[in-house]
Image (spheres, grey):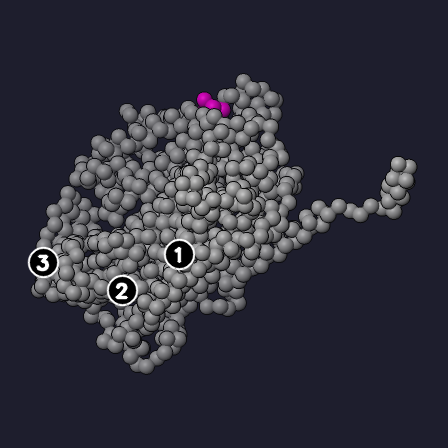
């Protein structure tokens, strides 16, 4: 059975794991809306014994246990956040594939905005500096006088 | 014996690459032309030696020579011949040998290419390329030697991982490596320019074909890997934001930015310092990718060996090249003179925006990939950064980038006119809006993002078409709408214009394919022979479950008939579970039925005692567009390489080059 994770594409040769069937037919909830919520939640939870795989994609027994827990909590009437909190409470923050926004992940979440912002600011500064540098300086009074003198002589 | 000669040839290549480093640098200082010329035979010799050594290893694999450790570990007598060949690079040692083979090939190509590259620049470039080759050959010889023997030789090998026994292995790594390693040339050119302290449009023109080649191959390599993942993994995903995927995406993003900034440098003599930095960063990211995959620092199945000495060696290489080149950059870049001015609203301005967004996207992927590792090292806290993070952060950066693409190619150089550009794009914008709204109306109640994506994709494709059409019509007095004139002029447009339009249309096609996945459906059920399972507009009937013959595995397959919901037969497909006795591993093979650009995708689950099976059936609308679009992008790159100015090369005296008249949309 496939217990490895699979993605592809790498510098090194890709190993793809062969086929999968993470969610088993017997796990599926009868209420399609609740099932689709379960799928949504599971695709955001990490399979802890796999490599970079969500419990929704994994064949590992632990992933199956987690999928069943998610569905049980949903059946018990939890909302999506409560289900996630429940799983995090048991397995820690590591289980979330989308990290929370907190002090220790601030830099992670801010990177896109910081790079865009700083980059845009840098470009603006550079463009302005160069535009200023490109504007010819005004003539000094002395030069003006010289020109006046030259044109007069003409 | 051949193996020992192959090993020796590798050692000889090490020595030759050392010659390739030392002599040209020395000659560039002393101005000795004869000594400088030594770089060419040295580069050719190093390539020849590595080619021989690669051929020797391939021969050992092809003939199943089990006295070679590498063959024992990765081959088996019953393995099909194609996989005996692709198995050469289906392991750490062999894949590194392929890596240096391509590296040396590029070095040899630079050595023989008839370009009007100034002799000193060329000599320095070859020396830098020699240094890269030297370090990596040293890495192979000291830590990853594929030529080790075993005594006594076993009768049978351990076989290649069944997951790798696929046509994908034959194509994906070579394509990807040409891409990765191709950027070593741009890197070598950048370092050479820094050593020389001079950089101009001639440099940009000399670098451009190499960048285009590397970029086109990297695009194909990533697309091929994505398709391979899609059909092998069994749940139809095509991108997983896995660290090793990100490792190939980062150089692609940086390389795309580089491709665009060299255009500005070539045409307008601007963005020099930034272009040099990008060239350094792109190859550094390729090296980082090698480090991520080879060191096992972000463990994943891609890591064949988690051998710490290798990791440390590659880390040292990374520090040498990244640190060294950035230090050189910091020291020498201020000496590079800045060139041409341009208004914010101009083609240059749009290309600067392109670079800003690509850099932000690349930084996001970079931080997202390495953040968990750094956080754990610094604080011990463990977090995961997975697909939901990247979808939240990367997509909002990609969308504005895509929106400016058609504007960028329409705006004039130096000073553009947004109003005129919008007018020219009016038809594309209007049509795309209609397409998006139609998609929304037809699928009312479905996903919201999908029709928006369809509109965006249509806008990119139509924008490219409009660009070609409006340029073929001409501007101002020479404007003509006669079909004969338009056709004649369209054919006469520079190839680079066609290349740009094709590549951008390719991006649009990819976006269409991705967007359409919003409407993908999935069906999951236990079915007995005779029963059906529906997904989207199709249903699959299980005809029978039975064995399917295979060369080196035993397979149980499900045979399915696909029908539309009205009951019309569309075709058949098979999906199976393969058991490889040599490794005692089971692999699932998905079954695909292509209908136009859409696919019906089935994969078999558990086979029960009563003959019923777990079956997954997906309907993937327009999914092939994702990879076809990538092929169109690469094609655009290839067409661009054939542009006249690449063949002709830059005149030697070109310094402050005027705009080449062929490539300027006259306002």
Q: Nearer the viewer, residue B527 or B54?
A: B527
Mark carried by residue B458: 1
Does B476 sit above or below residue B379?
above
Query: Is residue B48 visible to us here?
Result: yes
Which residue is label 3 attached to? B544
Distance (Cα) linking label 3 and label 2 = 24 Å
Q: Quadrant of residue A77?
A: bottom left
Location of residue B251 in the rendering, given as x and y in whole percent from the top left corner: 45, 46
Q: Chain of mark 1?
A: B
Q: Is residue B528 left or right of residue B661?
A: left
For the point 31% across and 64% down, the residue is B519
Q: Is residue B23 left or right of residue B482?
A: right
Q: Which mark is residue B558?
A: none
Whether residue B521 sits left or right of residue B506 in the image: it is: left
In the image, residue B232 lies at what x, y percent? 26, 52
As rendered, which of B456 and B390 lies closer to the eye?
A: B456
- Assess disc 1: are there few (<14), some (14-19) or many (≥20) residues with their C-alpha within 10 Å of its C-alpha: many
Residue B156: x percent and y percent? 19, 38
C-alpha gap between disc 1 and disc 2? 23 Å
**Are the two marked residues, 1 and 2, in contact with CB atoms closer than 8 angstroms?**
no
Whether the magenta-drawn stretch holds residue B626 is answered as: no
């Amino acid at each position: 059975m496939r217990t490895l994770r699979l993605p592809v594409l790498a510098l090194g040769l890709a190993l793809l794991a062969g086929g999968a069937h993470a969610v088993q037919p017997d796990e599926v909830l009868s209420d399609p809306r609740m099932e689709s919520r379960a799928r949504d939640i599971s695709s955001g939870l990490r399979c802890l014994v796999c490599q970079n795989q969500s419990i929704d994609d994994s064949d590992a027994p632990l992933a199956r246990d987690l999928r069943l827990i998610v569905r049980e909590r949903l059946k018990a009437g939890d909302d999506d956040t409560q289900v996630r909190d429940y799983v995090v409470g048991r397995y820690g923050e590591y289980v979330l594939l989308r990290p929370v926004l907190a002090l220790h992940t601030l830099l992670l979440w801010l990177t896109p905005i910081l790079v865009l912002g700083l980059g845009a600011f840098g470009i603006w500064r550079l463009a302005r500096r160069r535009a200023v540098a490109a504007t010819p300086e005004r003539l000094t009074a002395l030069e003006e006088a010289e020109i006046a003198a030259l044109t007069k002589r003409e | 014996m051949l193996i020992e000669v192959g090993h020796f040839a590798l050692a000889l290549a090490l020595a030759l690459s050392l010659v390739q480093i030392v002599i040209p640098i020395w000659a560039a200082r002393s101005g000795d032309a004869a000594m400088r010329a030594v770089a060419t035979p040295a580069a050719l010799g190093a390539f020849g030696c590595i080619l021989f050594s690669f051929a020797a290893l391939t021969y050992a694999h092809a003939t199943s020579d089990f006295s070679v450790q590498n063959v024992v570990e990765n081959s088996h007598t019953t393995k099909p011949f194609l996989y005996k060949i692709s198995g050469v690079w289906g392991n750490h040692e062999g894949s590194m040998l392929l890596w240096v083979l391509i590296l040396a090939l590029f070095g040899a190509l630079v050595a023989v290419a008839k370009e009007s590259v100034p002799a000193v620049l060329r000599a320095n470039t070859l020396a830098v390329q020699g240094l890269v080759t030297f370090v990596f050959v040293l890495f192979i010889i000291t830590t990853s030697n594929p030529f080790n023997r075993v005594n006594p030789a076993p009768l049978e090998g351990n076989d290649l991982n069944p997951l790798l026994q696929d046509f994908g292995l034959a194509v994906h790594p070579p394509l990807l490596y040409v891409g990765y390693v191709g950027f070593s040339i741009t890197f070598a050119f950048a370092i050479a320019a820094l050593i020389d302290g001079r950089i101009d449009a001639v440099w940009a023109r000399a670098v451009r074909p190499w960048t285009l080649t590397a970029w086109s191959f990297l695009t194909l390599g990533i697309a091929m890997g994505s398709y391979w993942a899609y059909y092998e993994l069994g749940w139809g995903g095509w991108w997983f934001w896995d660290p090793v995927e990100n490792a190939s995406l980062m150089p692609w993003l940086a390389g795309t930015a580089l491709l665009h900034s060299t255009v500005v440098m070539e045409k307008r003599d601007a963005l020099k310092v930034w272009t040099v930095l990008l060239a350094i960063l792109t190859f550094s990211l390729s090296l980082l990718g090698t480090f991520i995959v080879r060191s096992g620092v972000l463990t994943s199945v891609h890591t064949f060996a988690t051998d710490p000495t290798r990791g440390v060696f590659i880390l040292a290489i990374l520090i040498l090249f990244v640190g060294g080149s950035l230090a050189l950059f910091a020291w020498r870049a201020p000496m590079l003179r800045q060139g041409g001015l341009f208004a914010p609203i101009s083609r240059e301005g749009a290309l600067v925006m392109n670079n800003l967004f690509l850099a932000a996207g690349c930084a996001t992927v970079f931080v997202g990939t390495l953040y968990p590792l750094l956080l754990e090292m610094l604080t011990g806290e463990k977090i995961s950064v997975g697909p939901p993070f990247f979808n939240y952060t990367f997509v909002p950066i990609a969308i504005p980038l895509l929106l400016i693409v058609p504007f960028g190619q329409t705006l004039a150089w130096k000073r553009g006119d947004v109003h005129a550009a919008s007018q020219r794009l009016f038809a594309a914008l209007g049509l795309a809006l209609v397409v998006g709204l139609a998609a929304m109306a037809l699928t009312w109640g479905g996903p919201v993002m999908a029709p928006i994506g369809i509109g965006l994709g249509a806008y990119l494709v139509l924008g490219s078409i409009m660009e070609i059409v409006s340029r073929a019509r001409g501007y101002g007095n020479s404007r003509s709408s006669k079909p004969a004139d338009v056709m004649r002029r369209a054919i006469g447009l520079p190839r680079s214009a066609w290349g740009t339009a094709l590549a951008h249309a390719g991006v649009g096609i990819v976006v269409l394919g991705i967007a359409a996945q919003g409407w993908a459906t999935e069906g999951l059920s236990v079915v007995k022979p005779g029963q059906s399972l529906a997904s989207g507009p199709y249903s699959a009937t299980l005809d029978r479950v039975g064995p399917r013959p295979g060369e080196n595995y035993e397979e149980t397959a499900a045979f399915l008939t696909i029908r539309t919901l009205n009951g019309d037969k569309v075709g058949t497909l098979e999906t199976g579970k393969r058991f490889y006795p040599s490794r005692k591993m089971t692999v699932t093979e998905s079954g695909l039925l292509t209908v136009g650009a859409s696919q019906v995708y089935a994969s078999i689950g558990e086979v029960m005692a009563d003959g019923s099976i777990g079956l997954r059936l997906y309907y993937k609308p327009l999914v092939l567009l994702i990879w076809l679009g990538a092929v169109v992008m690469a094609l655009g790159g290839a067409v661009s390489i054939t542009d006249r100015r690449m063949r002709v090369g830059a005149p030697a005296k070109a310094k402050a080059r005027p705009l080449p008249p062929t490539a300027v949309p006259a306002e």
